[in-house]
Amino acid sequence: MKDAIGRHLSYSIGKTPGAATLRDWRMAVSLAIRDRMADAWFASTRRTYEAGAKRVYYLSMEFLVGRLLEDGIVNLRLEERVSEALAELGQDYAEVIADEPDAALGNGGLGRLAACYLESMSTLGCPAYGYGIRYEHGLFRQQIVDGRQVERPETWLQQPHAWEFERPESRYEIGFGGSVRDGTVWTPGESVWAEAFDTPVAGWNGRWVNTLRLWSAKPTEPFDLDRFNRGEYAAAAESEALARTISRVLYPDDTTEQGKELRLKQEYFFSAASIRDILRRFESQFSDLRQLPEKVAIQLNDTHPAIAGPELVRLLCDEKGLDFDEALQIAQGTLNYTNHTLLPEALEHWPEGLFGRLLPRHLAIIDRIDHAHAKANPSRTSSVRDHGQVKMGELSFIMANRVNGVSALHTELMKSTVFAELHRLHPERIVNQTNGVTPRRWLLSCNRRLSTLIEERLGLGWVDDLEQLHDLEPHLDDPAFLDAYAAAKTANKADLADWMNRTQEGLTADPAMMFDVQIKRIHEYKRQHLNILETIALWQAMRDAPNAGWTPRLKLFAGKAAPGYVFAKEIIHLINAVAKVVNADKITNKMLQVAFLPNYNVSLAEKLIPAADLSEQISTAGKEASGTGNMKFALNGALTIGTLDGANVEIRDRVGAENFFLFGMTTDEVDQRRAIPDHAAKAVEADSRLARALAAVRDGRFSPEDPGLFRGIADNISGPDYFLVASDFSDYWRAQREVDGAFANAGDWTRRAALNTARSGWFSSDRAIRGYLDDIWGAETLL
Ligand code: 26W
């Protein structure tokens, strides 16, 4: 390993050890690890061909990959050898790992799920490709300036990226606009090249390596030399700049579709390039296109790649000469669709004017698909085209072989709400696949102390068979195990506290405090404002009775708000304002500290989750489709305080109700409560603690320089309060005080935490992928 690193430093990076920077070392190690993946990568491709195996294609606008070096080292079982080699070369393993920028090619849950699923498909030996966009700029960097979020461009590609292989030979011309003549002949008005960049995705033990193929937009019109020579420098580069715009930046919204033309262009760009690439690969091995559903399963990660359906029909009809009905049948046998949200504002629908202008041929095909469905289902009332909009949820549903939700509750809500009619027409189509997370990144790699302890007791079989964690339960009667379990958590907390005290001003984090963590995108339905309101009420109660024996708490928040989401940005501002006042309060700051950690991303999550005692999963019931952070926290021994929403329901069922702090209304109670006029005002009236906390926010207790600054938040919570913060407050307070009591009993808390770890194995993404393989894709694994 040492030689391999040294060789790459010299011959790939071109540096001597003496002159090498940290990045040079990181690149040299990355190339050395990449080499070790190559053979398995080639072998995986070759074995897939030889077996004539069915391939899975995961189409996603987002892959929230994070860092790749440590993931490669861990999956290839090379930690010791790499850290020894680096030590001999005078380099620090942790520093080298931390030097890599996150590949932040996603917003949140949907993107991270795609990354976990790719890694699990490799671990299981499932022949699969991920298809997405190689954004030049991923999700914005978040800076906090005077307590407010400020967005800065993300620049991961402004340095060499060790984990991609450019494939100039794999490129497709993607057209937009133009016109259609004779009904089917589409002549695009403009076009760009979609060029492939491949990233190897190794599974556990490195025995199988799949490909993440990301498309980058390149100009079809070369640089205009004539204009340049005429001194029109900007104009000369215009076509190139325009083309690159398509893969320039990730849209930072994760719940509200903006309906922007560029977003639709991005969706078509990568979907069309992917479908062409899939057909090319199929035809290189099989001759009869009717075999496509047997040999190819395509998963649409939400509606963002839904245009892939009409595109497949277009190619089968217009280029391969199949008749429409046959083409549609083949497509429906190949495509599957996962829904990740029920929020109305997140369901994509495109103005038919924009759609028709950009994709005239596809709009016509969508109409035919819609009519075919209406003809086959005369009782149908809904349609894909409706009130001048093209509804991508409906289109995805009628084009799919299987449609799935991402938690048991969410899947049932899909059947009873957004897809009620289509479910009635196709009762077998909707299935559930509860989300999962990869235990390699989210336990073995990010929590070495705990995974080493588990390894000492169980060996390493659990790493790719996570339900073996159940075998920890007998060890819970061994005080030595519980002590070691608690010691691992305490040491993780000490590391985090040390890092925070060094990097976050105005904060004094004490590892003896309960680390109470809420990390996720900022959104009203996730109710970070309920959490900070309870924090204010706790602070006020502590000030009233400082010697009442309070359980010391560190309230940790992190998360990005979509740049245009004003209310979410105000919530960030309020959290920072409360932190400033509370952390400086001499009466309480030994018992309560609050922090908002900037620039939440995959790497920060890996740092925070192993050190958490309490996991905040407090969304309004019926709003969080699943959640995946909740699973990561439970695996790492944090107890959950949460509502019966998304996968919280299944986590509580599996870890045991006695090891979960439940509060709040159920989905039915939410609907009933919302029907009560002035439900929030009634709740405020009934709870003086709530009223007092709201008053502090409204009256400028946290913004003396601008007393009305946070009035909007207070008025919303005591007024419309659509997400029922006021109505769930009292029960949340009750649950938090229960948590206080439980945490004070350290031995019992450790036991309950360890039971969470032992009973969360089912939430492995390996289990989820096995579900997709069996219930949706009908594909085999080759390992
Ligand atoms: C069009 C703008 C847009 C972009 C992204 C709308 C919606 C999205 C995603 C679907 C939002 C998302 O990430 N949803 C989350 O998906 C996770 C993985 O299934 C779930 O665990 C979360 O509950 C869900 O909010």
Image (cartoon, rainbow, N blue to C red):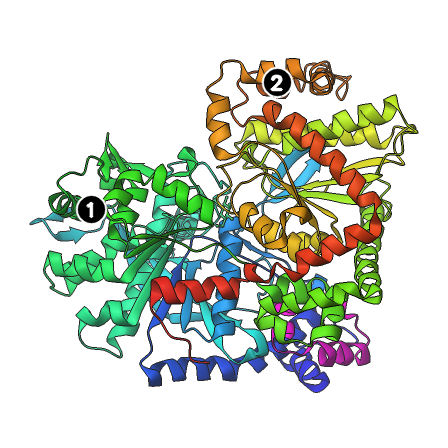
* 5 versus 738 height, above or below: below
* Nearer to us in this view, 24 or 228: 24
Residue 484: image location, x then y, percent: 82, 64
Crowd rating for badge 1 (residues with CA inside 10 Å; few <14, some 14–19, many 20+) = many
Closer mark to the observer between disc 2 and disc 1: 2
- Residue carrying label 1: 366
Question: Which stretch appears magenta?
Answer: 68-94
Q: Is residue 81 magenta?
A: yes
Q: Is residue 46 left or right of residue 123?
A: left
Residue 77: image location, x then y, percent: 65, 78
Q: Give the mark nearest the N terminus, 2 or 1.
A: 1
- Residue carrying label 2: 683
Asked which quadrant contains residue 711, the reply is top right
Res. 458 in view:
yes
* 644 versus 456 height, above or below: above
Q: Which element is circle 1 on?
A: helix
* 719 versus 126 height, above or below: above
Residue 178: image location, x then y, percent: 21, 46
The amino acid marked with disc number 1 is Ile
Q: Is residue 675 left or right of residue 454?
A: left
Q: Quadrant of the N terminus?
A: bottom right
Distance between mark 2 and mark 1 Cα atoms = 48 Å
